Image (tube, grey):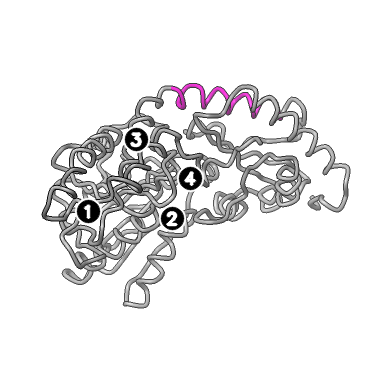
Amino acid sequence: MIYLDNSFITRPSKEAVNDMIPFLTEKWGSSSAPHQWGHQNLPQMEESYRAIYQMLGADENDQFVFMSSGTEAVNHVIQSAYLDVTMETGKNHFITSAIDEAPQIMAMSRLEKHGCVCRMIDVNEQGYVTAEAVGDAMTPRTAFVSLSWANGMTGVIHPVEEIAKVCKERGVLLHLDASHVLGKLYFDLKQIGADLITFEGSLLHAPQGTGGLWIRDGVKLSPLIVGGNEQGGSRAGPMNLAGLVALGKASKQLAETRDLICMEGARLRNQLETGIQKGFPEATPLFTEQERLPNITAIAFPGIVNEALLFALSEKNLFASIGGGNNQQISLILEACKVDPILAQTTVSFSLSRETTDEEIDRAVKVIVETAKQLRNSSSHMVVL
């Protein structure tokens, strides 16, 4: 198998899985119980939180809330912004981008039933949201801005520091989903200037069912789930200790391998792009002049329907993506970036991980080139240009 769909889900770390097993079979006590059986797990919880804080570069006064997924975390911040800002101040204008992921778009659309106005701003031809566009979209009633830090299909990174400055000047809360960025970029949370950051654990080599929410010190955020004092009342209900432990280990490994994915990931991504272009000259990697994540490339194969290429590749045990799940279809994302609609329908996204090897990339190039040539010679899989 050649797995190049790591923007959808990553293989869970063996060490993270091994660390969580004892908390499913032996150390199953509740940390909130008033006795030693539950309290014995507190040291491991604290160690896991430390690893997550260090991975994020968070200050000890900031708050972290363990979640069941990035989707839950995104819904939490948007619904809580409605409770804390809209209900208290009357500000009912919410902003996201036209290429953002399903949780942001659907959670905001839901608020429209409660009298909110949700604005999806356009991206430019370079594939990112400008700070100017965010500022122009704001009104005196803007309550909240929610964006993905980078796009998981194209790899293009938004200028989040500039956007954060605009939000701060206008007194508007800024939420960034960092699921595709963590472990792949160097950043300083204080310098970034976001108020809230969410992430999906299964994109960080943690098991499915894990995610997180970082809350900057001083930011008020009402709980979405109430009913107990777990996690300081920020998210009621029994703690998934096994999941937290696994996320902690994955976070530790992510911090330790950041250099690897930043350097090797970019090298292997470039090797993939160059190899495909050499064997199939019509292929066109997109957004190569933009600031991109080191592990993601979107490549157009002019004349070939991307669905047909994706299916043919999967038949050969090579897995890539054209969107789906939380991600929008790549063709829609590209059309929003003013890419020709016909070319957009020929584009496939490939996303690498720290586990991707030179040998896999060499094999991937061979399989992709052979498959593209086969489809090019089959008129039933061609796009009319």
What amino acid does circle 2 point to? Ser
In the structure shown, which secondary structural element does the residue marked by tag 3 occupy? helix
Range drawn in magenta: 260-276
Question: Label 1, label 4: how many angstroms apart (C-alpha)?
Answer: 38 Å
Q: Which residue is mark 3?
A: 249
Q: Which residue is mark 4?
A: 151
**Of the residues under marks 4 and 2, which one precedes in the sequence?**
2
Residue at (32%, 77%) from the top-left corner?
114
Rate crowding at label 4 as few (under 14), some (14 to 19) or many (20 or more) other CA atoms within 10 Å: many
Question: Label 3, label 2: how many angstroms apart (C-alpha)?
Answer: 33 Å
**Of the residues under marks 1 and 3, which one precedes in the sequence?**
1
Asked whether 318 or 179 is in front, the reply is 318
Q: Which residue is mark 1?
A: 30
| Residue 220, position as x, y percentages in the image | 16, 56
Question: Label 3, label 4: how many angstroms apart (C-alpha)?
Answer: 26 Å
Question: Label 1, label 2: how many angstroms apart (C-alpha)?
Answer: 40 Å
Asked whether 291 or 242 is in front, the reply is 242
